[in-house]
Image (tube, rainbow, N blue to C red):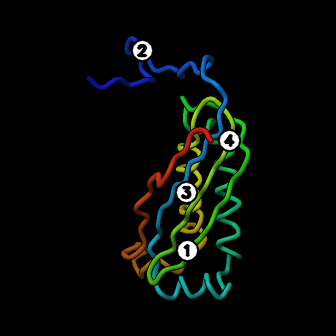
Amino acid sequence: MVEFTHIKNDRVHMVDVTAKSDVVREAVASGRIYLNDETLRAIREGTVVKGNVLATSRVAATIAIKDTSRLIPMCHPISLSAITVDFSEQEDFIEVTVRVKSVGKTGVEMEALTGVSVALLTIWDMVKSVEKDKKGQYPHTRISDIRVDKKRKGG
């Protein structure tokens, strides 16, 4: 039988981690945004009207990581010890990779996933004017493959 740790007596609650020991924790998450060639070129050349897309996305991801417990109701507020946000530009997409570290009683997967999600959404927001077609739709633009690539506890 599957046990959901955030549900007790049909009520959601924050899991009690009081008895857990503080240990080093790390999570790496990634995701992709698929964009048109001209959009990718504009990002690479720094000609996007709204400004530096990747720098803005990195800042947005960092803020989101720090605010994860405010966004996800049963997520513990935790002390973060490191955040990195990296971008890999491919032929038809940009991949965002976020690494989050802490020393504490609970993991940082949700923080890493939140950082990736907000980074990708920020990229979309900054380039949406050139991604739209003549009908105002986004036939090519998509976010995909958001996942936890690695998590580590201890050591």
Residue occupying the point 41% across, 72% down:
138
Label 2 belongs to which residue?
Answer: 8
Place of residue 150 in the rendered image (x, y in percent of width and height, measured from the top left): 49, 51
Question: Disc 2 versus disc 1: distance between alpha carbons?
Answer: 42 Å
Question: Disc 3 versus disc 1: distance between alpha carbons?
Answer: 13 Å
Place of residue 112 in the rendered image (x, y in percent of width and height, measured from the top left): 57, 50
Q: Nearer the viewer, residue 109 or 43?
A: 109
Question: Disc 2 versus disc 4: distance between alpha carbons?
Answer: 27 Å
Position of residue 27 in the picture relative to residue 84 (left or right): left
Dot 1 or dot 4: first in sequence order is 1
Report the residue that reaches farthest toward the front: 155
Q: Secondary structure at mark 3?
A: helix
When asked about the image quadrant of residue 2, the answer is: top left
Mark 2 in CB contact with mark 3 (< 8 angstroms): no
Dot 2 or dot 3: first in sequence order is 2
Label 3 belongs to which residue?
Answer: 116
Mark 2 in CB contact with mark 1 (< 8 angstroms): no
Instruction: Please state which of the two labelled residues, at mark 2 or mark 4, is closer to the viewer.
Output: 4
Label 4 belongs to which residue?
Answer: 102
Q: Nearer the viewer, residue 72 or 83?
A: 83
Q: Is 110 placed above or below 97 here? A: above
Q: Secondary structure at mark 4?
A: strand
Mark 3 in CB contact with mark 4 (< 8 angstroms): no
Label 1 belongs to which residue?
Answer: 88
Instruction: Please state which of the two labelled residues, at mark 1 or mark 4, is closer to the viewer.
Output: 4
Question: Disc 3 versus disc 4: distance between alpha carbons?
Answer: 17 Å
